Amino acid sequence: MSGPTKSEHLLHTLRSQGRFCAGSGSPMYGELCELVAADVEAGGVFATILAGHEDDPSRHAVPLRLLGGLHRLVLDGRAPALRRWYPSTGGSWDAAAAWPDIVRVAVDRTDALLAALDQPPQTNEVGRSAALIGGLAHVNHEFKLPIRLFEIGASAGLNLRADRYRYRYDGGQWGPAETPVTIDDAWHGRLPPPAAVRIVERHGYDIAPIDVTGADGELTVLSYVWPDQHARLKRLRGAIEVARNVPAQLHCRTAAEAVGALTLADGALTVLWHSITWQYLSADERAAIRDAVEHLGAQAGTRTPFAHLTLEPARTGPGSSLKFLVRAASWPDGRTRVLGECHPHGPPVTWQ
């Protein structure tokens, strides 16, 4: 029996992404992915735009590249007719009414949408900070040292400022009171220890890092947020404000190159973290990162500890559903553990 055709693969990718968006709180993108898929089936303008991407692997996230490019046109004023339909610009989504305007924009701005397909999504989901900083508090409770923080797949590096956000949970809150970023209902279960987290170095690595201190970078990261998710947009805008006041070093480097160049430091906990990044890496790059992490772990000592903290999808057994787990491995003891579970966009995080 023959496998699916290229067109069938693209349609499956579009519709799967739409179902995921709808189930993750974006009915707008759920409907829009279906409309684009139907247009591709009918040989419309989106079939032309997506030509050549029919067999791109799912990890390339072609639907999110396309929709991010469309959202960018709305945000930067090149598609003024769509502002009334996009909640991110004060509009109200109506799929049937908006679709003719979207098709016209796609026809008029085909070149911009084609260019968007060459850009990997830059999610910059600030909500994931709830998982990362909580995991870091759990890990550093053991070491109680200043932290050197390194992130792969960092994009604009907003999660490198996770300690500058405020996290609310039933019975308390954690983080500075004066921050413009507050993450509600952040934590459930066995809460992270209340110990201070003092980050003394912040380094982010990405193949296309974004400087959000300028207008172009700000629009780029906002364009990848689903337009009807108001809380995510508010958090992101606040995080951009924080980034302008809390420096972090961003480097244009592959994940494998970055991890391979890491070193440990006396009197500090060196932390490598990443969130929803693994799926975008090739098998060779994943293997290189694993080898580099093992090498760093072998070098770690009581004065030079190392931790690898992740929020990534995982299956706990054959046929099991996909879960998004917060996991930590720390050295010199080499202990690996699951700390908690959450949505891919973050809160609430249920700690174990």
Image: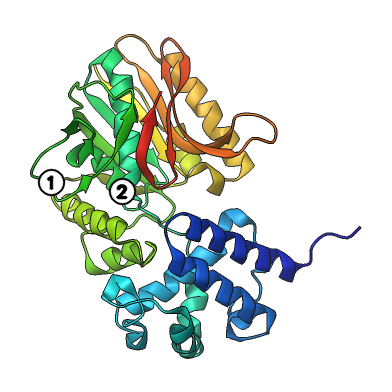
Q: Residue at x 36, y 54 (%)?
A: 209
Left or right of 329, for residue 83: left
Element at label 2: helix
Residue 58 quadrant:
bottom right
CA separation in Å, label 2 and label 1: 13 Å
Which residue is label 2 attached to? 126
Q: Give coordinates of residue 208: x percent, y percent.
A: 41, 56
Left or right of 3, for residue 301: left
Instruction: Work out whether mark 2 precedes mark 1 in sequence or the reverse, and give the earlier one.
Output: 2
Residue 25 quadrant:
bottom left
Q: Which mark is residue 121?
A: none
Of 121 and 227, nearer the camera is: 227
Callout 1 crowding tier (Cα within 10 Å): few <14, some 14–19, many ≥20: some
Left or right of 92, for residue 279: right
The colour scheme applied to this rendered structure is rainbow
**Contact between labelled residues 1 and 2, with CB atoms less than 8 Å apart:** no
Left or right of 176, for residue 126: right
Q: Residue at x 20, y 42 (%)?
A: 165
Element at label 1: loop
Of all residues, the one furthest to the right in this rendering is 1
Can residue 228 be seen from the camera position used here?
Answer: yes
Q: Give coordinates of residue 232: x percent, y percent.
A: 31, 56
Q: Residue at x 62, y 74 (%)?
A: 37
Which residue is label 1 attached to? 179
Of all residues, the one furthest to the left in this rendering is 178
Image: 198 above or below 243: above
Image: 296 above or below 44: above
Please state which amino acid type lies under the numbered disc 1.
Thr
